[in-house]
Amino acid sequence: MKTIPWSFPLVLLVLFFSLGCAALTAIQPTASPTPPPPTQGPINILFAVHIEPFLPNFGLDYGARREELYWLRDLALAHNAKLTVASNGEFMEYVEDFGDQALVQSYLNAGFDWGTHIHALWRRERHQWVKEPPDAPEETVRRIWQDNIQAVNAIIGAENNYGVAPYQTHQPLMVALMHEYDFHIETALTEPAGVMAYENLGHYPWNPFRPSAEVGRYLKEDLSQRQYVLIPHYPQLEPNPGHTGPRSLGAHQKYFLMEYLEWLHWQRERLPSKIWVFGIATHDCYNNPNRQYISAMLDWLDANFVGKTTPQGDVIARYATATEVAELFYRWEAEHPGTSSFSWERGQPYPYTYADMPILLRDAEYDRALDLGAALAAHRFTRQSGGPIYVLWSWDGEQVVDFSAQIAGQLRVHDGKGNHTTADARALIVTEEPIFVEAATR
């Protein structure tokens, strides 16, 4: 009988395991491809605080204003939000009078911004500030800027004075003064710019930009203007409307969702990156009666957007100071030389994707989100004239929805770009592109 070499069973064993491993390898499921990185960073949420002059219409009680600054600081810290403060000059005189430097320092220690808010008042002497009309001559405007900036610097130091929130300084003097004081950040739109934005766009710009010095062209970009960047934010959050449109909680929620829809479009289409900003604001003298609305706005943002991700894993929003937004913008500029961030002037088309959206939502206020399942997003808005309007989109391809519990019968469905059709509420088709839905007859 032929002897089998001792190594033969070992060879068979090795062969068996090799074939088995190969078979196991063959049936392993293919790993899902790693999703590409997002093209857009999160929406930066700016929380601005303007400290107003001591005038009868703003109130003269320093102690009450100080209490609001304590409240705002503690609210922001509780939400991990970041405040961007801009103060008039006389308030800083009171800070020194009452020894409240520690309050201001606590803002700086928390990483908040503190800068200068300029209304048309110049300083004759301590606590004697003289009010001027908005069309004051240039030499008076220069005095106004100088006195307010010096008073702020006296408490926080020029190195901590992040920038300017001007009320009504017009171009081209605005640009010249930003150069002279070497400010690199403007927050808020001046009132004429805010009126222009609301009346023509239906909302404020969603991106920082370098504003032009051309008279009356408040929303025009000038890429050659290298001194400063404008970071927009909305006016006081309050129930009362103003020259620049509604200011209520529901209006602010609507404004954010409008920007969110645009941001999602840029993510979905993988368009070139931009810096996105959404700003809310309050004032020391107007804050107390509006505390509930401000708290509710932060609660809503935290619950749904800040630090949250889309089903695709993209972070939706984060809190940021004006300084942080500006630094992001400068890096973006360096990576995208010669690229427009935002620009609009009269006669030009709507500068974003959904030109019909501001028209459809013109008199609308946000109401609530609807739960139609994980694959869908849906939000309801109320309107002063007519019934509610809804915005819906899918997170995962085409979906067919029975929407009759919200609106029975026929629906008018808008794509936000000027087109509309009708649909049966029992079989509403929803895709990843948002649709705006209302009753077919209003």
Image: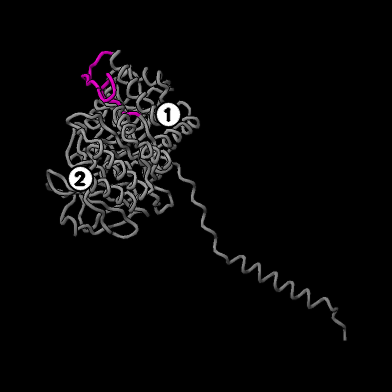
* Residue at the image point whose x is 49% and y is 46% from the top: 37
For the question of whether residue 418 can be seen, the reply is no
Q: Nearer the viewer, residue 432 or 189?
A: 189
Q: Residues within 10 Å of mark 2 (few under 14, many from 20)?
A: many
Left or right of 376 in this view: 13: right
Q: Nearer the viewer, residue 192 or 59?
A: 59
Count of numbered badges drawn on the protein: 2
* Residue at the image point whose x is 31% and y is 19% from the top: 171
User: What is the span of residues highlighted in magenta in the rendered image?
Assistant: 116-137
Which of the two discs, 2 and 1, sits closer to the camera?
A: 1
| Mark seen at residue 365 | 2
For the question of whether residue 89 can be seen, the reply is yes
Tell me the residue that label 1 is attached to.
Answer: 157
Q: For residue 122: magenta?
A: yes
Q: Nearer the viewer, residue 320 or 195?
A: 320
Q: Which quadrant of the figure has residue 221? A: top left
Q: Earlier in the sequence, mark 2 or mark 1?
A: 1
For residue 346, above or below residue 283: above
Q: Which quadrant of the figure has residue 217? A: top left
Quadrant housing the N terminus: bottom right
Task: Determine whether the residue tagged by mark 2 lies in a helix, strand or loop.
Answer: strand
Q: Which quadrant of the figure has residue 129? A: top left
Which amino acid, mark 2? Answer: Glu
Task: Determine whether the residue tagged by mark 1 lies in a helix, strand or loop.
Answer: loop
